[in-house]
Image: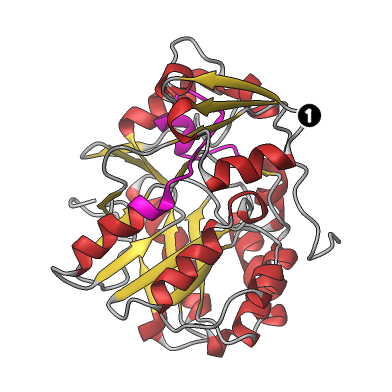
């Protein structure tokens, strides 16, 4: 079991730094921490991140860090393949691109050509952009869509800053989603019913085979329980459901472990959804990972989104929902719609 106060040993032997943010406070703090890293000045992050003929797998095994300034929009409408939990104004924020974890099926591997991590250090600009949006209507915002903010918290402090920002803006609700084991963040910030911590759960065998570097199922549940005990609203995400030969037994065991390690009645809600990915992304994943059973599965293309065959997707989702309904109110169970509108 890893210590809750331990940090990731970030393997950033090389750090690319845009000239425009070399003197930014966060840049200076990160460079001071990695004093032995090779620092390479660049004009624009895309010169490195968007290069052609990059090998995602090789880069992922020894990631470089890119510190940049976001000069464009950083808040975007939520994707149709994501759950909006009934909120009318659903958005996501992109303050970091790519993740320290290495999930085999991650859509980021299809979205980006690079396995390196980009941190837009000027988070204050995103806050200004969001404040302008909040003047128009309330906002539900997923802030860890393109990364795992909690896994990178000791590097950036962004999860804490997002939580503090949400507390001071009554029309803002944020979700911070993670597969991390870290619990120390809950000692640093005050609970707020508009700061939702969401833990993605998978059976242990899926985690071991397909979610490299992430926390174990029990570690995630312990962290989620800690958040709930500190007064934060907690969401469990049984999403994506990944098919395997013994999927019923695997997901039954997962839910049994969840019920034994967290008070399910106190959860804010849960989401359930089988694996789905935009067609353009799966093409790249299949090319880059020819031996991956998840990437190479014969999915159905439904309006540009690759999903499990409808009968299988329904069977997996309905099975998990039937188990959850024995443990909690139906009103708290949100199912991803794999419909013609997906």
Residue at 54 percent across and 89 percent down: it is 266
Q: Give yes or no for residue 13 being in the magenta stretch.
A: no
Residue at 64 percent across and 74 percent down: it is 188
Expressed as whole percent of the image width and height from the top left, the position of residue 249 reads 65, 62
Q: Is residue 168 above or below residue 217?
A: below
On screen, residue 79 versus residue 155, left or right, reads: left
Expressed as whole percent of the image width and height from the top left, the position of residue 4 reads 79, 65
Residue stretch rendered in magenta on the structure:
102-125
In which quadrant of the rendered image does the N terminus lie? bottom right
Q: Give yes or no for residue 117 being in the magenta stretch.
A: yes
Q: Secondary structure at mark 1?
A: loop
Q: Is residue 47 above or below residue 35?
A: above
Expressed as whole percent of the image width and height from the top left, the position of residue 261 reads 71, 79
Q: Residue 336, located in which quarter of the rendered image? A: bottom left
Expressed as whole percent of the image width and height from the top left, the position of residue 286 reads 47, 24
Residue at 60 percent across and 58 percent down: it is 150
Give whichever of 155, 309 is nearer the camera: 155
Residue 100 seen: no
Residue at 58 percent across and 51 percent down: it is 156
Give whichever of 166, 83 is nearer the camera: 166
Which residue is under mark 1?
Answer: 36
Q: Residue 213, located in which quarter of the rendered image? A: top right
């Amino acid at each position: 079991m890893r210590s809750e106060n331990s940090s990731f040993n970030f393997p950033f032997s090389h750090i690319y730094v845009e000239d425009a943010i070399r003197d930014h406070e966060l840049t200076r703090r990160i460079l001071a921490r990695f004093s032995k890293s090779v620092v390479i000045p660049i004009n624009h992050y895309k010169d490195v991140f968007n290069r052609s003929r990059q090998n995602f797998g090789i880069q992922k095994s020894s990631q470089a860090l890119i510190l940049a300034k976001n000069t464009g929009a950083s808040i975007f409408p939520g994707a149709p393949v994501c759950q909006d939990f009934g909120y009318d104004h659903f958005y996501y924020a992109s303050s970091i691109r790519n993740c320290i974890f290495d999930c085999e099926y991650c859509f980021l591997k299809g979205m980006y050509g690079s396995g390196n991590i980009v941190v837009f250090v000027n988070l204050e600009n995103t806050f200004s952009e969001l404040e302008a949006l909040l003047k128009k209507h309330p906002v539900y915002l997923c802030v860890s869509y393109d990364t795992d903010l909690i896994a990178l918290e000791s590097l950036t402090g962004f999860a804490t800053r997002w939580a503090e920002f949400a507390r001071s803006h009554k029309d803002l609700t944020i979700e911070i989603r993670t597969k991390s084991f870290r619990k120390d963040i809950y000692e640093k910030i005050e609970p707020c019913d508009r700061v939702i911590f969401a833990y993605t759960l998978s059976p242990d065998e899926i985690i071991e085979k397909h979610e490299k570097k992430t926390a174990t199922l029990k570690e995630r549940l312990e962290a989620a329980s800690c958040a709930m005990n500190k007064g934060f609203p907690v969401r469990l995400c049984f999403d994506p459901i990944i098919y395997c030969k013994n999927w019923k037994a695997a997901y039954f065991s997962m839910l049994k472990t969840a019920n034994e390690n967290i008070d399910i009645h106190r959860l804010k809600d849960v989401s359930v959804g089988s694996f789905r990915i935009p067609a353009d992304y799966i093409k790249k994943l299949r090319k880059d990972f020819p031996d991956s059973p998840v990437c190479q599965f014969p999915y159905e293309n439904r309006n540009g989104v690759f999903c499990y065959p409808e009968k299988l997707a329904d069977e997996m989702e309905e099975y998990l929902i039937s188990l959850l309904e024995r443990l909690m109110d139906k009103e708290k169970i949100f199912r991803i719609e794999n419909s013609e509108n997906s």
